[in-house]
Each structure stands twice: as C-alpha cells, then as structure tokens.
Image (tube, rainbow, N blue to C red):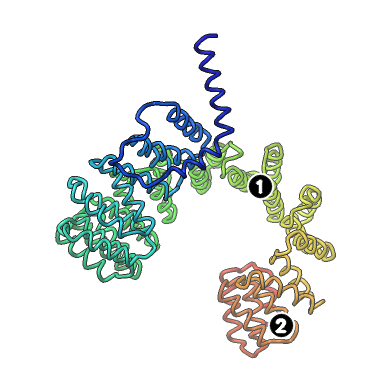
Amino acid sequence: MTNITAKKIFIFILFCISNLAFANDTVNLNKENKIFNENHPAQITETNAEFVYKFLLAEIATQRGDLNTAGHIYFDLAKLTKSISLAERATRIAGSARNGRLAMDSANIWQKLDKKSIEPKRILAELFITSGNLAKARPLIKTLLEKEEKTRSEGFLYLNKILSQVENKKNALRFIIDITKPYLNIPEARFAIAHAAFSAGNKKLAIEELDKIESINPKWETAALFRGYIIGQEWPEKALAFYQTFLRSNPKSNEVRLEYAKALTNLKKYDDAKKQFLKLVNSSLASSEISLTVALLAIELGDNILAEKYFMQSLKRGYSKPAQIHIYLAGIYDDRGDFDETLKWLNKITTVNNEYFVDSKILMAEYIAKYDSVDSAIEMLNKLKKKRLSSNEKLIILRNKASLLLTENRSQDAYDLMKLEEEEFKDSPEFKFDYAMLSEKMGNTLLMEQLLLEAIKLKPDYATAYNALGYSYADRNIKLPEAKRYIEIALSYEPNNHYILDSMGWIHFKLGNIDIASQFIKKAYAINKDPEIAAHLGEILWIQGKKEEAKEIWKNSLNRHPSNTVLIETTNRFR
C-alpha cells in the first residue's frame, strides 16, 4: 500500500469517526470550559492525537457551514493550547456565526493571551456596546483611545456607528460624554456627542456641539451635512439656506452640494437642482447615477436635448439598469417623431428576465399603433406568446391588447379577445374582473355579475370586485340592499379608496339618504377630483338646492375632463 493510499484511508476513517462522534464531542467541549487563567500552563503543548482530532473536527464543521460548532471547538482548543491564533480564529468564526456570547468569550481569551494587541480589545468593546453593556465597554474604549493616537479621530466616528445600535439612547449619550472628556479639542469627539445627543432627543445639545465644531473646523463637510439634516427635519427651506451659505464659503464641497441638490429636488425646485447637479456631474462624485439624475431633471423641465446628453453619459459610465435609460431615450425620440430611432432603443431590451422587458414591449406596441396601426401593434404583442413569461406578465400584455382595441372603439374585438383567452386565465381574478367590465360595456350584465362573483370566490378580499358589483346594482337602481352590502364589504377592506367612498355615497343617494350620501361623496372628492365623482357630487348638491355650488364643481371638472361621458350626461340633464 502506498503512502498516498494510506493517507486517503486515514482521512476517510477520520471523517467517518467524526460523523459518529460529532454531536457528542461538541456537547462535551462545553464541559471543559472552566474559568480560563492565562498564567496556568497550557494543557496541550504539542500536536498530539487529541489536538489533531479536535482541529480536524473544527475544520469539518467549518466546511459544512456549521460555524457555531466550529467556533466552540476552536474556543476549546484556544484554552487548551493557549494559542493566540486559535483564540483569534474562534472569535472571528463566532462573529460570522452571529454568536455574540461565544465571540465575547473568545475575544476575552484572545486579549488575555495577547495583551499588546489592540484588535481583541476593539472587538470586545464593540461586543459589549452592541449588547448594551456600556459599563464593561468603558475601560476598554478608554484604553483604545489612549493608545490609538493616530486613529483616534476615526475611532470616534466609528463609535457613532456602533452606539447607534444601543437601545437606550440616553445611556449612550452619557457614555460618550464621559469617554470624550479628554478629547474635546478633537472635532470628531464633539461630533460623537452631537450625534448621540440628537439620537437621544436632545437637539439643543447637538446644535451646541456642532457650533463648537464649526469654531474648530468650519470646513468639515460631515458636520455640515449633519447640521443640514437636523435643520431639514423641521424646516426644509431653512436647510436650503444653510447649504447655500456653507457652499459660498466652501464651493468645492461636493458632498454638501449633493445634499443641497437632493433637497432642492425634494422641494420640487427642479431648475435649481439641475444647476447643482450639473456642477457635480464631472466632479469627484461623478457617477452614472448623477448623470441619470441630471437627465431626469432635464426631462422634468422639458429639455430633451440636455436629457439625451446625460442619458448617454450615464450609459457610458456603466449605469446598472441600462434598459431603464433605453426606455427614456425611446420617449425622447418619440417626442421628435422619429419612429425608427424610437424602436431602435426599445429593441435593445431583449432579455425576457429583464425587469423592463414587458414594459418595453407595451411601449413598443403603443408606438406601433401610433405610427402604423393597432393591428400591427397587436401582431407584435402576439409574438410574445412564444416567450417564457409569467402569468401576470401575460395578463398585462392581454390587457394592453384590449386597451389598444378600445382606444379605436373596437369594443366587440376587445370582447372577443377576452373571450378567446378565458380558459388561459380561468384562475385569475384580475382577468375575470377585466372581462366583467368589458361585458358590462357590451351590455351583458348577467355575464358581468357572474364573472365578478367568480373573481370574489377566487380572491375573497377583492375590494374592487365587490365595489364594481355593488355600484353596478346601484347605478341600475336594482337589488339596492344587496348592493349596499357589497360596497360595505369593499369599504371594510379599503376604507380610504375614493371610488368605493363614491359608491357608498351613490347607494345612499339611491336609497334616499341624501345627507349621508353627501358626506361620503364629499370625502371621495376631497381625496380625488375624479370627473365621475364630480358628476355625482354636483347632482347631490343640486338636489339639496345648492345649484350654484353644483355648477361650479361641474364647470371645473369639465375644464379638466371635457370628454368624460358621465360628466357630460349629468350636466346635460340639469340644464
């Protein structure tokens, strides 16, 4: 037998033995975990059978992904051998296993064995802080700050991060105030106080500390960003003024300029935001995201030429979702009437699992219908049947085919299309709802009722289906008690849905409860000034004798929606 073969057999036997002994040994290891004394001699001083066995056991556990077991074994070996490297390995594996107790015990042994090393003290201090034991963390942090003069400033910033995990924010504030006493000439120390103070709800102290930082280092961006954030929580406009003042003194402060640009965007000051982003687009913060933001702001401001330039720059800089930009570029070329270029950009989105694939095809269909014909658009969408699409994506495509037909008043074709697909979507409540609405449009109210009930059976919390059924009865002035019950169910699922609130008002109107009807429809109109809600509200106001108010609501709604049939029919009835 060769040495190689013998070695393989030995490893195989060891592996088999480990499988049998694994559970028992890992449990028994904890029994050996007596109080550790670094001054006592090591129990294992050479690579004997016990060491090899336990070490291999730990390695097997690591390879299996059982980090908790591996950490316990390394912890035991570190105590038996007094090995610094094994104590460190036990600590890091316990950290990866998210076993805080084991990591703490292992780091404690590590620091006892390696008294000169800073790393175990740092890890131990962090573990104490994140567990909320600030009293034990305090002496370790003080030692670290005394020894780490070169990295002391960064240390205070790191403390901010780990102290944010402490639940008792006032304890965290008291802790940092004590820790920073010898270092109040360091801006980062005062920043740590300001950060903890703000987290603890003491905004006054936070601002005081930021003022002191400004007197030490008025150009420090981190402190300026934090002050801007605090101000912006209550006074967004005041935060803008602060950013402007800071940037006048520090025009190269790109981090603050970026926050200023974001704040302008949030306040919908797009033109001002665009100017700031343009200053950043080729700065040290330049990125595909910044280029995209400039392009989107340009779109918002109607500047397609500038938008195209920065969309292209974002693509060149490797934006992670190029298909999103391709869709925007297609829209730009559509605005210019360039059909070929529009399709060129959409045709770049070819992968079915791309999140923008279906959207791109729907847009392409709209453009084909616009420049060619609806039939050509539907023919293009029909080719997608060969693609591996989800049921939801197939339904989206079907809905859009029906919508294209309806835009040309081809209701019968849309109805026939839905009827043809009925078997394909027999388990889809959303399909049944769409088919029901189209059936009602075609005058087939019996089929509409049947389909809505089937949709509700498939999806018992389908508020929109309950509402549609109830409203249909109310509008036809039939089965009013049943209609009211359906709308009440819908409202219980979506109490702030303006369409359902309108339906509830309408059923009360049909039942003669005018004042109750008025309350519901006014609430619906306050949420959304939909033209049909405006028609209903105006009718109720008219009957209440408030004719001038009714006329004003109808007039305003007609100005916004001049072709709405329900609104036109209602106003014509009351002339």
Answer with mark 2 or mark 1, whichever residue precedes in sequence. Answer: 1
Task: Give the residue at mark 1.
Answer: 393
Q: Residue furthest bottom?
A: 545
Task: Give the residue at mark 2.
Answer: 509
Q: Kindly report the distance in space between the C-alpha atoms of the residues bearing marks 2 and 1.
A: 40 Å
Badge 2: few (under 14), some or many (20 or more) residues near its Cα, within 10 Å? many
Name the disc covering residue 472, or none. none
Q: In the image, what residue occupies the spot 36% across and 43% down?
A: 287
In percent of width and height, residue 304 lies at 43, 49
Q: In the image, what residue occupies the spot 31% across and 36% down?
A: 41
In percent of width and height, residue 567 lies at 66, 73
In percent of width and height, residue 465 lies at 73, 65
Q: Secondary structure at mark 2?
A: helix
Judging depth in this view, the residue of 273 and 33 nearest the camera is: 33
Image quarter in which the N terminus is found: top right
Three-letter amino acid code at disc 1?
Answer: Glu
Q: Are marks 2 and 1 in contact (CB under 8 Å)?
A: no
Q: Secondary structure at mark 1?
A: helix
Three-letter amino acid code at disc 2?
Answer: Phe
